Amino acid sequence: MKVRAGAIAVLSGILFSAMVGGVCAGDGNTGNAGKGKTLYANLCIRCHGVEGKGNGVMTFTPPVADLTAPAAQSKLDATLLKTIHDGRKNTAMGAWKFVLTDEEIRDVTAYIRVLGTGANRTLP
Ligand code: HEC
């Protein structure tokens, strides 16, 4: 019994570090935030605003999401990617799959993470 518990602890340790490694170090699917910034400026800024706070020049009901808020930043990349890809029904958030490649959607998602840290001002 003791041995089995130990094995489980070791296994979950390995699993956990694999998960953290995947999220933090990137798994080859991490977008380029620099490219994402350009895409964001051209396509998203008019609604989401310079800082991503949902205070762009265009306003809507339901309101534009604050991309820097925990509500957005706590979501997994995969969830943000899906929203950008497919849009949100009955809101102003359109489906960008018709405009952006999967790689570009990853790039712009990487930039949303930068907006979340406030480090966007130091990006080239
Ligand atoms: C025409 C205005 C408009 C444009 C342009 C726009 N969005 Fe949005 N976006 C919205 C609105 C409105 C919502 C909130 C939808 C809702 O209520 O669910 C939203 C929601 C989102 C969300 C979901 C946030 C969350 O908390 O789940 C993401 C991610 C997002 N937008 C990214 C983008 C990106 C990236 C672009 C540019 C490629 C973009 N948006 C362009 C209006 C816009």
Image (spheres, rainbow, N blue to C red):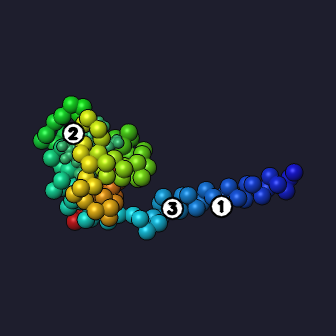
> SS at mark 1?
helix
Please tell me which residue lies in front, 74 or 79.
79
Residue type of the residue flagged with mark 1: Ile
Residue to which mark 2 is pinned: 92
Mark 3 and mark 1 lie on one chain; the one further toward the N terminus is 1
Q: Is residue 13 left or right of residue 107?
A: right
State how far apart marks 3 and 1 are (Cα). Answer: 12 Å
Residue at the outermost front position: 98
- The mark found on residue 22 in the picture is 3
| Residue drawn at the location 41% of the way across and 65% of the way down | 29
Pinpoint residue 124: horizontal percent, then vertical percent. 22, 65
Q: Residues within 10 Å of mark 3 (few under 14, many from 20)?
A: some
Residue to which mark 1 is pinned: 14
Tell me if label 2 and label 1 are in contact, CB under 8 Å. Answer: no
On screen, 42 above or below 87? below
Q: Is residue 117 something one can see in this rendering?
A: no
Q: Residues within 10 Å of mark 2 (few under 14, many from 20)?
A: some
Pinpoint residue 90: horizontal percent, then vertical percent. 26, 35
Disc 2 versus disc 3: nearer the observer: 2
Q: Residues within 10 Å of mark 1 (few under 14, many from 20)?
A: few
